[in-house]
Image (tube, grey):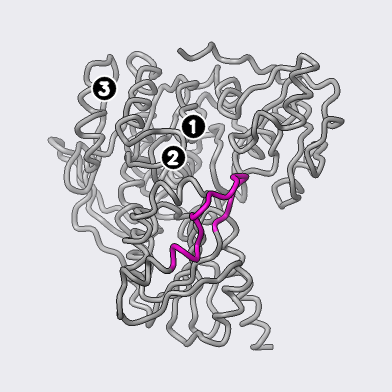
Amino acid sequence: MVSSTFEVDPDDRVHFVGAGGVSMSALAALHLEEGGQVTGSDITKNSRITNLLEKGADISIGHKPENIDDQDLLVKSTAIPEGNSEVQQAAEKGIPVISRAEFLAGLAADKKQIAVSGTHGKTTTTAMLTEIFLRAGRDPSVMLGGELISAESNHISGEEEHFIFEADESDGSLVYYSPWLAIITNLEAEHLNFYEDEIEIADKMKEFINRIESGGFLILCSDDPLIRTQIKPYAEKRDINIITYGINSGDYKADQVKTKNFKTSYQFKIENKNVSRDMRVNLPGRCSVLNSLAAAAAARAAGVDWNAIEDGLDNFKGVKRRFEVKGMVDDIQVIDDYAHHPTEIFATYLTAARSEPSRIITIFQPHRFTRTRALWSDFVCTLSRIDYLLVCDIYPANQKPIEGINSRRLIEEIKKEKGSSNGWTKYSGTPQEAADFLLDRLDGGDLVLTLGAGDVYKAGETLLEKMRGRED
C-alpha cells in the first residue's frame, strides 16, 4: 500500500539531506521558487549547491546533527542511510522525514502529472518533452535527472497545469505519483540491489500503472519484450488510453531512420492513420529515435501541435552527460555519457562508432558495487567487445566495498574474454590517471568516450584542458 500524498506547504522550511544531488537540488530549487525556505547539507560542494546558495538556501557541507533545528520537514535522497545523523536528529525532534519521491509527489499533487519511467532513457525523453512544450509556448513545471542544456537548468517552476518529471523506478518509489500521463520507455534487469529480477520490476510497474488517473494515458515502447508480454496486457484491463511506439511496431512508428554527423532523421508515421512527417532529432542513434517517439506521443496527448513537436526535436540541444560532445582539439573529439548499465554502454559505443572515428578510446567507471556484482558477467561480455578500454575504480555512491568486486579483477576477466584481439584493456584508478595515460597516446581522428554515472567525465574535461594548453 502507498500512503496518501504528503502535503507540502509552500511556506514550509524544508531541510534536504544530499542537497547537491541532481534530483534533490532540483526539488530544493522548486521549493525556493514557490516561496519556501530551504536548508540542506551534502558531503562536498558542487555547482548545484552554489546555485542553491545564490537562490537563498542555507546549505552546510557535512552532515551534522546541529544542522537540524526548527525545520518543518526533512527530505532525504535514496543515497542517505537511515542512520544518518541529521535523519536521526529530525526523528528525535519529531520533524517528519520523507523521501525525495514523496516530496515530489507533494509538489505535483495539484498538477496534471506527466511521469516518465523506464530502465533507460528517462532523462532524455523528459528533456525532449520539455523542449517541445517550451517551443509550443507552454509553461510547465519540470524536474529532470540532468541539466537541460537549452534552459541551463535541471528544473522549471512553471505556471500552467502540467508537471513533467522523471518517475525513478530504482527504489520502487514511483508508486507515490498519480500521473495523468505516464511513459514507460523500456524494462530490463537493473537496480538488482532492490529488485530480485526483471519480473519484480515489471510487477512494480503494474503498481505504477494502477496510479494513472482513470481516462488518462499510458505510452509504451512496443519494441521492448517485457513491455509487450508483461505490461501492455495488464494495462489493457485498466480504464486508460494506451499509445504504443517503436521502430519495428506500434501506433507511432519510425521508418527510414538515418544518422549522420550525430543527428538523426526518420519518417514518422501513425498506424492506421494517414499521417506521415519528416522528423529530425538533434541526437544520434536508435535510442534517441525511440525517446523522440515517446515525447511526441505524450505531446500529442497533451494537445501540442505537430509544428511545435518538429521544432522541439529539431532544435533539441540535449542534456548534460547524455551523449554530450565536450569538445574537440587537434581532431580528437571527447564525448561523455551517463551510461552505466551494459545495455546502455554498448548502445552508446555503437552510436559513437557511426561517426567512423579512427579509434574509440573508452574510459569506463563502474557505478556501485552492488550493480557491478549483479551484472558482472554482462559487464565482462559487453566491455570485451570494446577495442581500446580504460577501466577506473568503482564509484561507490555511498556503498561499502564488496570483497572480490573490483575493477582490477573485472579487467582480468575482460582480457580473458577478449583473447588476443587488437587494442588494449588497462586499469586506471581515477579519471585523472586515465587522462594522464591518454594525453600522449591520442592521434587525430580518435574519439574519447567517457562512460559512467560517477565522476568519470572529469577525465574528458582534463584531457581537453591539457590538449588546449599544448596549443598555446
Tag 2–tag 3 contact (CB < 8 Å): no
Disc 1, SS: loop
Q: Amino acid at mark 1?
A: Asp
Question: Observer-nearest residue: 196 or 166?
Answer: 196
Mark closer to the chain start, 2 or 3: 2
| One can see residue 209 in this view | yes
Estimate the x, y position of residue 27 in percent, counting from the top left: 64, 33
| Contact, mark 3 vs mark 1 (Cβ under 8 Å) | no
Residue to which mark 1 is pinned: 171
Give the label on residue 191, or none.
Answer: 2
**Tag 2: amino acid:** His
Q: 279 or 357: nearer the eye?
A: 357
Measured Cα–Cα span from mark 2 to mark 3: 23 Å
Range of residues picked out in magenta: 394-411
Viewer-side label of 3, 1 = 1
Q: Secondary structure at mark 3?
A: helix
Mark 1 touching mark 2, by CB under 8 A? yes
From the viewer's perspective, is 56 left or right of 255?
A: right
206, above or below 318, in the image: above
Residue 195 on the magenta segment: no
Helix, strand or loop at label 2? It is loop
User: Most extreme residue toward the left, as rendered?
Assistant: 272
Of mark 3 and mark 1, the one earlier in the sequence is 1
Badge 2 density bin: few <14, some 14–19, many ≥20, Cα 10 Å: many
